[in-house]
């Protein structure tokens, strides 16, 4: 009995600067839609780094479940952004107001522990906090790239709201990680 050959990871279809979207449409790799879902993918990978670091810091492990949930939801956003055709879009997992509300609740929960912020802070401190700040800036870029799609197509409004709220969550999570790890926030100094 022979085993069937494994599918190859490379297809060579992108060798000429094009790629296929989830719905089968062929677009250039510099298409705003590809840039949008690509930055969401980059954000997702950055959150994977954050989650990997959490294992070494038990005081921060409570962030792991929410970050895993967010990673799954970002995968859904990427799929939505990689789809133009409405019939395929409707078959994909949506981003919902409830998902956004849960992020807001988590922001409120973490903020309850934090001192009031009266100054701008530098993205610094503990290694986990610093990586959460990197994720935040990547999230802001994902939001900007996704806005290029969302302003022309209301189907992406919830994804855009989600990314906006997520960047707020990542900012608060970075501050919370610094607090839990005893790191003083570094205030911006006007020079």
Image: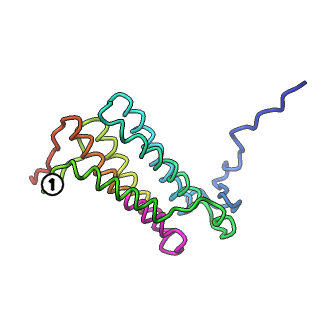
Name the residue at 46% across, 62% down: 98
Number of marks: 1
Q: In which quadrant is the N terminus drawn?
A: top right
> 141 or 52, which is in the foreground?
52
Measured from the top left, where is residue 26 in percent x and y? Answer: 68, 61
* Residue 153 shown in magenta: yes
Residue 76, compared with residue 5, is above or below; it is below
- Residue situated in front as seen by the camera: 124 or 166: 166
**Residue 176 image offset from top left, x and y in percent:** 25, 44
Q: Could you tell me what secondary structure mostly forms the magenta stretch? A: helix
**Residue 187 lies within the magenta run:** no
Residue in view at x 71 percent, y 49 percent: 13
Q: From this viewpoint, which residue is outermost toward the top? A: 1
Q: Which residue is mark 1?
A: 116
Q: Which residues are magenta?
A: 144-165
With 73 as the anchor, is 112 left or right in this view? left
Q: Secondary structure at mark 1?
A: loop
- Residue 40 lies, in percent from the top left, at 48, 53
Residue at (25%, 36%) from the top-left corner?
A: 126
Q: Position of residue 16 (x, y in %)?
A: 67, 52
Q: Residues within 10 Å of mark 1 (few under 14, many from 20)?
A: few
Query: Along the line of sight, which residue is nearer the eye, 143 or 157?
Result: 157
């Amino acid at each position: 009995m022979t085993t069937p050959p494994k599918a190859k990871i490379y297809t060579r279809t992108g060798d000429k600067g094009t790629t296929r979207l989830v719905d089968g449409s062929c677009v250039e790799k510099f298409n705003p839609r590809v840039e949008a879902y690509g930055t969401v993918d980059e954000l997702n990978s950055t959150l994977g780094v954050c989650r990997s670091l959490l294992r070494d810091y038990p005081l921060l492990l409570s962030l792991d479940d929410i970050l895993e949930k967010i990673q799954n939801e970002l995968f859904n956003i990427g799929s939505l952004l990689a789809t133009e055709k409405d019939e395929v879009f409707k078959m994909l997992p949506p981003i919902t107001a409830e998902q956004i509300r849960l992020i807001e609740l988590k922001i409120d929960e973490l903020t309850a522990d934090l001192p009031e912020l009266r100054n701008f802070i530098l993205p610094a401190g503990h290694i986990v906090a610093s990586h959460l700040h990197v994720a935040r800036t990547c999230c802001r870029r994902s939001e900007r790239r996704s806005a290029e799609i969302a302003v022309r197509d209301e189907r992406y409004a919830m994804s855009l709201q989600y990314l906006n709220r997520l960047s707020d969550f990542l900012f608060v999570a970075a501050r919370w990680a610094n607090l839990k790890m005893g790191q003083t926030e570094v205030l911006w100094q006007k020079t």
